[in-house]
Amino acid sequence: MVARRRRRQQLRTMRKGAVHLGLLAVSFWRAMPLLNAATLPTTLPTATTDLDYSSGGWSGTIPTELGLLVDVTYFDLGSNALTGTVPTVRPNSSPPVTVPLPPWSPRTLHPHPTTTTTSRAHTRAHRTRRQTHHHTPCFATPQELGYLSEITGSGENKFLGGNGMGLTGTMPTELGNFVKMTEWFYADGGNAMSGTFPTQLGRLVEHVKGFNVNGNAFTGAMPTQLGNMVKMSSIFNLGDNHFSSSIPTEFGKLDKMVNVYRLWSNKLCNDVPTEVQALSSGVGSYFQVTTDNSIGTTCGWIEDARFPGVGPTSVTSISWGSSEKSGTLPTEIGALTQVTGFGIGGNEMTGQIPTQLGRLTEATYVALQTCLWSGTLPSELGKLAKLTRIRLNANNGENNMVGTFPTEVKFFIKVITHIKPGHG
């Protein structure tokens, strides 16, 4: 009877502690659903170093409170059904602090290695705590996952990825704090993260294998900073997204890669840098760079039925003179930076000459004569340092361009132009 009463008292005490903890500090919490709950717990022992909730049937969002576990070195939430965004913002902007601990906190039950426990004074202090702070929560200030800067690795092919995952929103820039991480940065699977890809992830310079964000919806340019991950040897996968840029030449610095180098199924354009193509001989399997991309087409050029056949990067001369074209000249014309000769004179082109023509820095000849241009002559044409001739004479003597002649353009060897009288 005495033993049973003692046991009941212990259970009541443990339940009382559970009110504060949300999760009892027992040795078998790792990778096990909390009392068959479907969502991840918001409180764990602060001395936790391994956080493995992979393949546990968890759903819901990732608790921001996990950011308090700053001693974690192993972190894996992969192959669950987690949704929502990856936490980035804390309720306040204060830096990490030591949170006051209640009497039944994990650190009281299982002291952290740096915690000293001594004598009766220590016992009295905890008794006082129990009397005055018995409603104090274990964790008072949730922090973003980016504070887990001690992480060195995760489960193979998991981390924030794997089958069933459904994370959305942007990739937090704070994950660039994982500078000690060496393997398995995964955010693939069923995720649908979007927005531009953080340049800060280029700080993961200790990464050796497993950098995979395949199958999301990232847009914009591939960060050149990812080329700093020069220790990578296998599984560098940015495929099946919406990246729309040229391939950074810096990606050629990943010369230790031996398998799975995938940039496939994006909107990558221009030519493959020679530094990147050189890696193909060392990558034994899955060197996929050109597959389902727009390699060989000019980045930034949008197909226009009026101006066919100029998308390929091999095009270096454009001659549309007297070809019955009309309307405004698209600003995307500035994307054709490889062009050395550009002629569109003798058409019914209207509107202002695009300032983007100033990006055709390889051009030696530009013909814009006998059109119906209006507005001023762009000073950006002065950036065409290789230009030897520009033609701007007006259509049938009808002068529609106004303003002064830009001084930036006056260095051209031969200029044929008409400016409306009285306007310089």
Image (cartoon, rainbow, N blue to C red):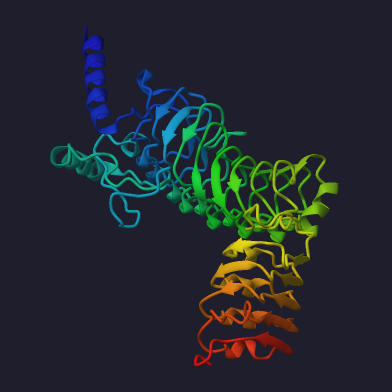
Residue at image coords 33%, 49%: 90
Give the camera-side residue of 179 and 114: 179
Identify which residue, 172 or 30, lies in the foreground. Answer: 172
Residue 292 location (% of width, % of height)? 70, 41
Classify 333 as above or below 74.
Answer: below
In the rendered image, which quarter is residue 253 located in? bottom right
Q: Residue at x 25, y 44 (%)?
A: 122
Point out the image quarter for the N terminus: top left
Left or right: where 250 falls relative to 400? right
Which of the 4 image quarters holds residue 320?
bottom right
Q: Is residue 205 above or below residue 8?
A: below
Seen from the viewer's position, the closer of residues 292 and 204 is: 292
How many numbered discs, if any? 0
Residue 367 location (% of width, % of height): 70, 75
Query: Residue 228, position in %: x, y?
Result: 65, 58
Question: Horizontally, is 248 left or right of 328 in the view?
Answer: right
Horizontally, residue 241 falls left or right of residue 411, namely left
Residue 152 percent coordinates (x, y): 57, 45
**Residue at image x 64%, y 48%?**
267
Name the foreground residue: 123 vs 67.
67
Viewed as shown, does residue 24 lie left or right of 78? left
Which residue is outermost to the right? Answer: 281
Query: Hey, which residue is sitting farthest front in the picture?
Result: 396
- Which residue appears farthest toward the left when viewing the image? 132
Q: Quadrant of residue 227?
A: bottom right
